[in-house]
Image (tube, rainbow, N blue to C red):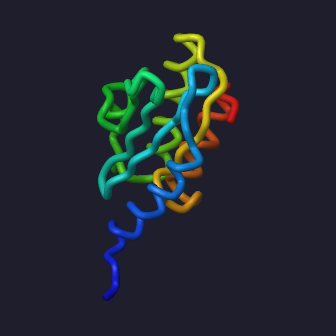
Amino acid sequence: MSKSREEGRRGRHERIRKKVVGTKDRLRLSVYRSLNHIYAQIIDDSDGCTVISASSLDSPVKEMAQHKGNVKTAKEVGMLVAKKAQEKGIKKIVFDRGGYLYHGRIKALAEAAREAGLEF
């Protein structure tokens, strides 16, 4: 029996989550991508709550007249989540790629967050 792509991604994500855990000192930056949008959250796993979130649906990114599921939009979301994190005093995080390959939109979001000042 062959797995679908989504089932394979979920399995990879479960394996990654065994190792990647956000603490009070280093929160977790989790990424989810759909065909049309990209979402990023900074999560405190010890409390089980989302501290910061950003996506291609947020107004600063949404105002750009372009397709929301591309690398350019992912960079903007990465910059936005890093800006919000710095406003709350968060500098060090752990990156959770969510079972996706570190390529394309995921890589663009991560590199933009690094350039904006997050350390991971």
Numbered-mark total: 0
- Return the x and y of residue 38 as percentages of the image width and height: 38, 45
Q: Nearer the viewer, residue 47 or 117?
A: 47
- Quarter in which the C terminus is drawn: top right
| Percent coordinates x, y for residue 87 in the rendering | 54, 11
Residue occupying the point 40% across, 30% down: 54
Name the image quarter holding the N terminus. Answer: bottom left
> In percent of the image, x 62 and y 27: which residue is there?
26
Specify the quadrant of the image occupied by residue 24: top right
On screen, residue 50 versus residue 86, left or right, reads left
Horizontal side of 22 relative to 50 (left or right) equals right
Q: Is residue 112 above or below residue 87?
A: below
Q: Quadrant of residue 47?
A: top left
Residue 35 rendering spot, x and y as whole percentages: 31, 58
Q: Nearer the viewer, residue 70 or 11?
A: 11
Q: Which residue is painted at 34% across and 50% down in the image?
A: 67
Is 57 placed above or below 92 here? below
* Residue drawn at point x = 47 percent, y = 40 percent: 30
In the displayed orientation, state which residue is furthest to the bottom.
1
Q: Position of residue 75 (x, y in %)?
A: 53, 41
